[in-house]
Amino acid sequence: MDKVKAKKHLGQHFLKDESIAKDIADTLTLEEYNKVLEIGPGMGVLTKYLLEKDVETYVIEIDAESVEYLNAHYAKLHGKILSEDFLRYDISKTFGNEPFAIIGNFPYNISSQIVFRTLELREQIPEFSGMFQKEVAERICEKKGSKTYGILSVLVQAFYDAEYLFTVSEHVFNPPPKVKSGVLRLRRKENFHLPCSERLFFNVVKTAFNQRRKTLRNSLKTLNLPDNLREDSIFDLRPEQLSTEDFIELVKKIEANGV
Ligand code: SAH
């Protein structure tokens, strides 16, 4: 089998530049875990640099043709190729409840879903790095006050320290995507359990950003907060004016009022 033919509906843009592939593989610090899961390996341009490292490498790939290619070309991956959809796969079948890192030159059509799934699995994922569409990578790492700051930024930064590492041009892919790419690294915070209800935190952040032009007093009406609480000046703000820590304080206030 020669080469995998790029399929648009699977977000396939294969990286051609070996030195960038190596740079991405090197973003993992390899602390706190000894297993890595690469999402969407394609023809393995990143995988081969992971296989050189002192870490056990698994890959998960939805495309049967890519899986066939990987089986034919990487003997070291034998038994560690999951021919599955990352978004639907029950990861405990492979990792139990052991920690593992995630890496990838990710399929951009499901970027946000990959990040949300990672957040669900955060107890097991001390580190996450790889490449997204540049805007998405920037948004995840963005701080309060910016237009692109949003749900992804707040939720990710509640649990992870997010670093935007470098930008990658569209010309190093086959076929080239329409947009530039950005590589980031997320390292789980030492204390990643929130001092408030995590369910309420997710709910408040999502509800507030769903109407991001409104003040919290208006956007959070559906939560039926007591009037005395709604007089607090924090409710004059719009969600993009609150840091992750501010959202946590807000949720603590809501909880203190018995909501
Ligand atoms: N890492 C390779 C390929 C990047 S393209 C490279 O850098 O060249 C994105 C890859 O993700 C494709 O191989 C695509 O088949 C795979 N993919 C798309 N959706 C997926 C999903 N839900 N689960 C696992 N892999 C997926």
Image: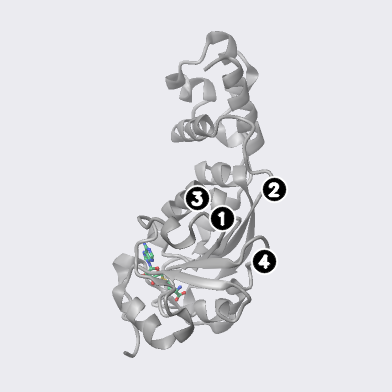
Residue carrying label 1: 125
Residue carrying label 4: 29
Amino acid type for the residue under numbered disc 3: Leu
Q: Position of residue 102 (x, y in %)?
A: 53, 62
What residue appears at the point 49 percent right and 78 percent down from the top-left corner? 172
What residue appears at the point 51 percent right and 46 percent down from the top-left corner? 152
Element on which disc 4 rests: loop
What residue appears at the point 65 percent right and 67 percent down from the top-left corner? 30
Element on which disc 3 rests: loop
- Asked where in the image residue 255 lies, by quadrant, the reply is top right
Tag 1: Cα neighbours inside 10 Å, few (<14), some, or many (≥20)?
many
Residue carrying label 3: 121
Q: Is residue 72 above or below residue 182?
A: below
How far apart are the two marked residues, 2 and 1, measured between alpha carbons? 12 Å
Q: Nearer the viewer, residue 251 or 184?
A: 251
Tag 4: Cα neighbours inside 10 Å, few (<14), some, or many (≥20)?
some
Residue carrying label 2: 190
How far apart are the two marked residues, 3 and 2, measured between alpha carbons? 16 Å
Q: Nearer the viewer, residue 184 or 202?
A: 202
The answer to whether marks 3 and 1 mark residues whose Cβ atoms lie closer than 8 Å is yes
Element on which disc 2 rests: loop
